[in-house]
């Protein structure tokens, strides 16, 4: 079973979930993708939020 823990969520629906071994699942209301490293996950959410404006 894969570990999953929500670590960040925005009011626009973007989320970051830790899924283990340094991997993070970055989601918005339309789709999800996996990145390695919390910094990459946070930067991805920032890009998504900026493009949604």
Image (cartoon, rainbow, N blue to C red):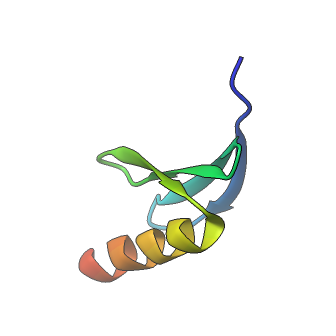
Q: Is residue 7 left or right of residue 11?
A: right
| Residue beneath the point at 27% across and 74% down | 52
Count all numbered tags in the image, as a single digit.
Answer: 0
Quarter of the image where one finds residue 1:
top right
Visible in this render: residue 49?
A: yes
In depth, the one of 4 and 13 nearer the eye is: 4
Q: Position of residue 53 (x, y in %)?
A: 27, 82
Q: Position of residue 22 (x, y in %)?
A: 68, 52
| Residue beneath the point at 29% across and 47% down | 30
Visible in this render: residue 53?
A: no
Q: Is residue 20 left or right of residue 48?
A: right
| Residue beneath the point at 39% across and 54% down | 28
Q: Position of residue 40 (x, y in %)?
A: 51, 70
Q: Position of residue 20 (x, y in %)?
A: 71, 41
In depth, the one of 18 and 21 nearer the eye is: 21
Q: Is residue 43 left or right of residue 38?
A: left
Q: Is residue 30 above or below residue 4?
A: below
| Residue beneath the point at 43% across and 70% down | 44
Q: Is residue 3 above or below residue 42?
A: above
In depth, the one of 49 and 36 nearer the eye is: 36
Quarter of the image where one finds residue 38:
bottom right
Q: Is residue 18 above or below residue 12?
A: above
């Amino acid at each position: 079973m894969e570990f999953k823990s929500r670590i960040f969520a925005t009011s626009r629906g973007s989320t970051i979930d830790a899924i283990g071994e340094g991997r993070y699942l970055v989601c918005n209301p339309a789709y999800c993708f996996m990145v390695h490293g919390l910094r990459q996950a946070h930067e991805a959410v920032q890009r998504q939020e900026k493009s949604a404006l």
